Image (spheres, rainbow, N blue to C red):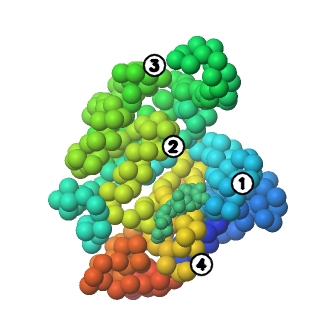
Amino acid sequence: MKIAILPGDGIGTEIVAEAVKVLGALGLPLQLETALVGGAAYEAHGHPLPDSTLKLAQSADAVLFGAVGDWKYDELERSLRPEQAILGLRKHMGLFANFRPAICYPELVDASSLKPELIAGLDILIIRELTGDIYFGQPRGRRTATDGHFPGAPEAFDTMRYSRPEIERIAHVAFQAARKRSKRVTSVDKANVLETFQFWKDVVSEVALEYPDVALDHMYVDNAAMQLVKAPKKFDVLVTGNMFGDILSDEAAMLTGSIGMLPSASLNDKGQGLYEPSHGSAPDIAGKGVANPLATILSAAMMLRFSLQQPQAADRVETAVKAVLADGLRTADIHASGTQRVSTREMGDAVVKAIGKATTN
Ligand code: NAD
């Protein structure tokens, strides 16, 4: 089982180090190879995604990714910015399905901005299509308007598009994921206004016929955004396009209290995956030893489950994280009175210890 370890920038190196420690505690035959990505790779090789890093990622069974980016690169031309590395990996590895679970741990119920009764027991899964939609549609650019409200004025434009196979494959992913949960899928669209999403709705409905055991409903994205804060527990699996998924998954992330708790997985059709926390490189706290490593540790658990077929090892990691939270250990982002504040490294050590304890029990 070969894993490419790409820590990246900012807190990326600190949190990935803790996840690597946790993987090491499982006693599995894992081959870990580390490479530079993002700003760190730009500094060393002049490109955020050097060929050697891409080749390592493509040859591995899975990629464990930290985060990339720093405001100091904002002036660089777009193709050399650290964030291009993640887009390049998605594109070259064909990572079309993004899984973002949003789980509210009972111990963290007060960390959410919503009332405890709305989010206690929350366990939803957002599945976002990751390689299509307006983020990748061509043509795009700037020109002089020839019609519209201001003919002759400078304008910018992007193209929203989805092909049938792109919608079919993400719909299959959603229905299959729902089969392992409570067998409900909500497909989020804007079919009332956009032709692309009327097509999306039609194709998802067709695919649903192959899954008679799974209930499908459709919801407009504006309503979905509202329902996520009004009654998030009504949902189970949400499936949507790239842009709506980008926004809704960040909204769902905050329901659970801290972005430092949320893992994610991006998979291709070969089962290869890239696993990363949902947050960025947090330059404001980098190097201070205060970042929460749990999102990255939980991403490693998803990697064990989805790409390495080690569900029991994944369970062991998730159980250890729950045990550490139950013991009252908290990094600064989730710290509250009555709990014990720990550093990034102490949190990683505690998870390793909990795995050891569970093994000997
Ligand atoms: P961010 O997610 O890095 O940080 C937002 C806020 O959350 C900050 O206050 C930060 O301190 C806090 N935070 C994030 N992760 C945390 C953790 N594990 N523990 C505790 N607190 C945490 O978003 P940003 O500040 O908008 O962006 C910073 C950089 O990260 C930018 O360069 C951005 O482009 C990049 N970014 C990268 C990715 C990625 O690598 N996939 C994703 C998002 C943003």
Distance between the Cα atoms at labels 2 and 1? 31 Å
Quadrant occupied by the C terminus: bottom left
In terms of depth relative to the viewer, which is nearer, 248 or 63?
Answer: 248
**Mark 3 Cα-neighbour bin, 10 Å: few <14, some 14–19, many ≥20:** few
Do we see residue 187 in this rendering?
A: no
| Ligand 1 within 8 Å of the CB at mark 4 | no
Callout 4, which amino acid?
Answer: Gly
Judging by the rendered image, the residue that carries numbered circle 2 is 97
Q: Amino acid at mark 1?
A: Glu
Which mark's residue is nearer the viewer, 3 or 1?
A: 1
Label 3: which residue?
195
Q: Earlier in the sequence, mark 3 or mark 1?
A: 1
Q: In what element is the residue under mark 2?
A: strand
Of the numbered discs 3 and 2, the one sitting upstream in the chain is: 2
**Camera-nearest label, 1 or 4:** 1
Q: Is mark 1 within 8 Å of ligand 1?
A: no
Q: Within 10 Å of the Cα at label 1, are there few (<14), some (14-19), or many (20+) other Cα atoms?
A: few
Report the mark closest to the observer, 2 or 4: 4
Number of marks: 4
Near mark 4 (Cα within 10 A), the count class, few <14, some 14-19 or many ≥20, is some
On the picture, is 336 further left or further right than 345? left
Q: Nearer the viewer, residue 78 or 91?
A: 78
Does the closest atom of ligand 1 sit within 8 Å of the Cβ of label 3?
Answer: no
Which secondary structure, mark 1? loop
Indicate the quadrant where residue 318 lies: bottom left
